[in-house]
Image (cartoon, helix red, strand yellow):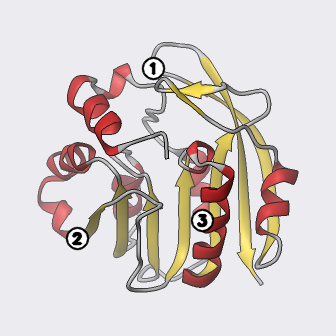
Amino acid sequence: MANSKEHWEGVYKTKSPDQVSWTQVEPINSLRLIADFNIAKDAKIIDIGGGDSNLVDFLLTQGYTDITVLDISGEALERAKARLGDKASQVTWIESSITDFVPTEKYAIWHDLAVFHFLTKEEAKQYVDLVSKVVKKGIVIATFSKQGPLKCSGLDIIQYNAEDLNTLLEQSFTLEESFYDDHTTPFSTTQNFVYCRFLKK
């Protein structure tokens, strides 16, 4: 996997949130798509590659009580913990790459904003096998679209459209919704993403 731990630790040690393209002050698309599953507030939610994303803050504010954040970068997780303060103890933090992750429990909702597009085709197959086993309700996944960037943080990515993602996941999941969205970066450029919400069959 090209996006090594050393690479991402370096990013989070040297750049602030307003210096990386993926920062979202309020992740409105993710929050709405998660809400559309109508899950109980104590259902298990995991945020893949959550890093120091603000998603966990909003989920806690909305009353969700069983949130896990996974990221390859310990530095990113420490940032999130520091930002949350006392609330950090309400969250399960896992420092791992997605390719090394061995879940010990199942999750109602699996959220992935911009991790999947870093995976090689072989790693993507392993990822699909994993979510098919550990996701009980559904997946929210967002990647760079065919109109999006070809690189992120200096690393190559694979672009997808909704049809591509559906082809990969349709054996175990039903595509409930998809749309394209221009994300405005902190430095006022735009990146086109495809968002998909899948329901477990």
Quarter of the image that includes the C terminus: bottom right
In the picture, measured across the screen, residue 124 lies left or right of residue 52, that is right
- In the image, taking residue 182 as reference, residue 21 lies left or right, namely left
Q: Earlier in the sequence, mark 1 or mark 2?
A: 2
Foreground mark, 2 or 3?
Answer: 3
Q: Residue at x 82, y 71 (%)?
A: 170
Mark 1 against mark 3, which lies toward the viewer?
3
Label 3 is placed on what type of residue?
Tyr
Horizontally, is 62 left or right of 13 in the view?
right
Give the label on residue 127, or none: 3
Evaluate whether residue 52 shows in this view. Answer: no
Q: Residues within 10 Å of mark 3 (few under 14, many from 20)?
A: some
| Disc 2 secondary structure class | helix
Give residue 82's position: percent from left, percent from top.
14, 47
Q: Nearer the viewer, residue 11 or 142?
A: 11
In the rendering, at what x and y percent does residue 44 appear? 44, 79
The numbered disc on residue 90 is 2
Marks 1 and 3, how far apart at CA: 30 Å
Q: Is residue 11 above or below residue 201?
A: above
Q: Residue at x 44, y 68 (%)?
A: 46
The residue that label 1 is drawn on is 186
Q: Residue at position x 36%, y 20% from top?
A: 19
Percent x, y for residue 151?
A: 59, 26
Q: Identity of the amino acid at label 1?
A: Pro
The amino acid type, in three-letter code, at marker 2 is Gln
Return the x and y of residue 87 as percentages of the image width and height. Answer: 19, 62
Which residue: 34% across, 37% down? 8
Q: Secondary structure at mark 3?
A: helix
